[in-house]
Image (spheres, rainbow, N blue to C red):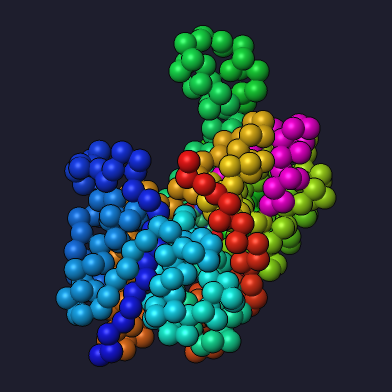
Amino acid sequence: MALANVLCVLYDDPVDGYPPANARDEIPKIARYHDGQTTPTPEAIDFKPGELLGSVSGELGLRRFLEASGHRLTVTSDKDGPGSEFEQELPTAEIVISQPFWPAYLTAERIAKAPELKLVVTAGIGSDHTDLQAAIERNITVAEVTYCNSISVAEHVVMMILALVRNYIPSYQWVVDGGWNIADCAARSYDLEGMQVGSVGAGRIGAGVLRRLAPFEVGLHYTDRHRLPAEVEQQLGLTYHPDAASMVGVCDVVTINAPLHPETEGLFDAELIGTMKRGSYLVNTARGKICDPNAVAQACASGQLAGYAGDVWFPQPAPKDHPWRTMPHHGMTPHVSGTSLSAQARYAAGVREILECWFADRPIRDEYLIVDAGKLAGVGAHSYSAGNATGGSDEAARFSRS
Ligand code: NDP
């Protein structure tokens, strides 16, 4: 077996250092997802589920496994700009691993600087930070850990919808600030009950959101490239719409759960947002580039949107002057919904499974493949379209930690 240089980009440790203990002693064991697919099945893991694995010191729990076989592992958070450690290491890297939360953008230019690169692994879901067209042309395999954090995100979406509609975040702030300003809290607070909620995309996350929202006694709508089975539509009381344009006008809340690919890039622009009901809520935990940042900020300022929440930006990390940091009525967080400690345990195990298969020359699960043998493959062939969604990612170098 040839020895490999593995280059892994992870987010920084907490500002106060790597935690000496976790808030909880254990996490639930999940063996299968909703559709029956098994959670990752590596031969072994070298971490305790529930540990912080996604930051630099966590190393996705990979070091012992890789070094025991003689491979070289480099872990860095320094990913943007030509002087970054990532670009310094790229020329000799055979395998690149990164998480969408802190993506190592693999543009065509960077792929050209990586002649040894054969495998790109997304520790999570969403490989749009890799120029898939360039990967196809260079015969690089791209894999992700499908389903590993879909429910983590679905839970986050439900939380964000409730937070916006009920005006939770400003109400919390009144308490922190020592106030008791009930009218200020109530003046923008509604019940979700009876509202019309629509999902763009009804895959693992979108359908997870719809299932979770059904007990709230709301009207449920969705649009997707492939229609769900009639019995699922009936069971959840779903109304299908052929596209986002025909759905958003009947909704009070819209949640975006489709991948970023050329078909969805910039989908929520001023024109589409302008067709929504005045005072709609928009929640986007899919990818920042699906929404036009200025159109969203203007709609929040004008009242066309009563609120916008999500955790995805473009680029990532978001520049300090990104309009979503300061626009009114937002509930933004950094990109965190899919990196709960519960999710990390699954995707770290999934990366380990993919690497075990790669080194042993065994096939990687079809459900993990995005690009293989010079074409979209597996899940990638179903949910992505060929092309490039990395344009403008060099803007991430403008973020400064200070
Ligand atoms: P799935 O592939 O299970 O679902 C995506 C769904 O979107 C599919 O049903 C797909 O259709 C549909 N879709 C694709 N294009 C369109 C379109 N133009 N209009 C409407 N629907 C469309 O993926 P997941 O649900 O697991 O994840 C979805 C996305 O969420 C990921 O690609 C990623 O970008 C993001 N994500 C965010 C995370 C976070 O931490 N914030 C974590 C994990 C994922 P079909 O397959 O039927 O063609």
Q: Nearer the viewer, residue 157 or 124?
A: 124
326 w.r.t. 383: above or below: above
At 80% across and 48% down in the image, what residue appears? 270
Query: Toward which corner of the image does residue 229 lie, by quadrant?
Result: bottom right
Task: Check the picture and name the quadrant holding the N terminus.
Answer: bottom left
Q: Is residue 229 visible?
A: no
Residue 226, percent from left and from top: 63, 68
Q: Can you tell me which quadrant of the image ligand 1 is in?
A: bottom right
Is residue 62 shown to the viewer in this render?
yes
Q: Residue at x 51, y 60 (%)?
A: 80
Q: Who's the residue at 26% across and 67% down the image? A: 62
| Residue 199 higher or lower than 203, as above or below | above
Q: Which image quadrant is residue 191 in?
A: top right
Which residue lies most toward the front here? 83
Measured as percent of width and height from the top left, residue 126 is found at 51, 64
Relative horizontal placement of residue 201, taking residue 370 as reference (left or right): right
325 in relation to 30, above or below: above
| Left or right of 207 on screen, residue 300 | right
- Residue 11 image position (x, y, % from top left): 40, 54
What residue is shown at x 65% (from left), y 18% (from top)? 187
The picture places residue 57, in percent across and down from the top left corner, at 28, 55
- Magenta range is 291-310
Q: Is residue 284 left or right of residue 42?
A: right
Residue furthest to the left in view is: 68
Q: Is residue 90 inside the magenta stretch?
A: no
